[in-house]
Image: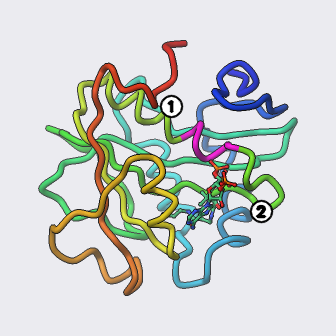
Amino acid sequence: MMSIENLSQTRALPIGLRALRIDDLPQMMALQASIYPPALLESAEVLASKISAVPAGWSSLAATEGDTLCAYALGYPWRSDRQPGWNRPLAPQHDCDVLYLHDVAVATAYAGRGIAGQMVRHLMQQGQQCGLSRAILVAVEGAQGYWSRLGFIATAAGRTDPAFGSDAVLMQRELLPSDPVLPAAV
Ligand SMILES: CC(C)(COP(=O)(O)OP(=O)(O)OC[C@H]1O[C@@H](n2cnc3c(N)ncnc32)[C@H](O)[C@@H]1OP(=O)(O)O)[C@@H](O)C(=O)NCCC(=O)NCCS
């Protein structure tokens, strides 16, 4: 397990960061239900596919305090010519050219401690090291301002899947090897 205490660029946290696992699913389901409205909840089957149907060596992230899942960040290689969907099982992808940050969720009790920022930076670093030159995401629930702070900008490209809600915004960000926002290699 990596320690955010060692990785944090801002302040020390007694929270660990590790690969997200299938056995995290029960706590993931509870966490998403605690922060998202019912229309934005994904099934256990869909969440499991997004943990598992990824290239060898790729992992999404869990932030934990002891046995408690404080936060998770689901992201995976994706094809930019495909529209991301909500609550659709992930099938293995080929010829991926972008990192798709699907869901970053932090339990309310752990908000504002830099956990989401650390997880996003590590997923972006993983994507950059896998040869992906861009990250995309769909900002929901008014989170566009949060993503702007991490360097994402709204794209002019078309509509998002209606399941994301009417206020959803497709955003993107370049992933450059020398990006100062990305953490040092670990
Ligand atoms: C958005 C979210 C992931 C941020 O997690 P976090 O670990 O608290 O984020 P960080 O600690 O890295 O950053 C906190 C900062 O972001 C700001 N922030 C949080 N949510 C924000 C939002 N929706 N819009 C703008 N700024 C936001 C906080 O005010 C805080 O600002 P400060 O550093 O000036 O005090 C978390 O609040 C969450 O899980 N929200 C519900 C799920 C969600 O909306 N996910 C994103 C879907 S696209």
Residue found at x 34% / y 71%: 169
Image height check: is 24 above or below 39?
Answer: above
The residue range painted magenta reads 114-119
Question: Is residue 36 covered in magenta?
Answer: no
The image's mark for residue 98 is none
Between residues 66 and 184, which one lies in front from this camera angle? 184
When asked about the image quadrant of residue 76, the answer is top left
Residue found at x 29% / y 34%: 175
Residue 183 in the image: state x and y as whole percent.
51, 23
Check if mark 1's residue and mark 2's residue have beta carbons within 8 Å.
no
Left or right: where 108 falls relative to 165: right
Which residue, given by chain and number where applicable, does mark 2 sit on?
108
Residue 125 in the image: state x and y as whole percent.
42, 27
Which residue, given by chain and number where applicable, does mark 1 sit on?
122
Q: Amino acid at mark 2?
A: Thr
Please rate how many residues cluster around mark 2, counting C-alpha atoms within 10 Å: few if below 14, some from 14 to 19, many from 20: few
Q: Amino acid at mark 1?
A: His
Cβ of mark 2 under 8 A from ligand 1? yes
When asked about the image quadrant of residue 16, the answer is top right
Residue found at x 48% / y 64%: 145
Image height check: is 167 above or below 58?
Answer: below
Between residues 61 and 11, which one lies in front from this camera angle? 11
Residue 143 in the image: state x and y as whole percent.
50, 67
Left or right: where 54 falls relative to 39: left
Residue 116 in the image: state x and y as whole percent.
61, 47
Please rate how many residues cluster around mark 1, counting C-alpha atoms within 10 Å: few if below 14, some from 14 to 19, many from 20: many
Q: Secondary structure at mark 2?
A: helix
When asked about the image quadrant of residue 168, the answer is bottom left
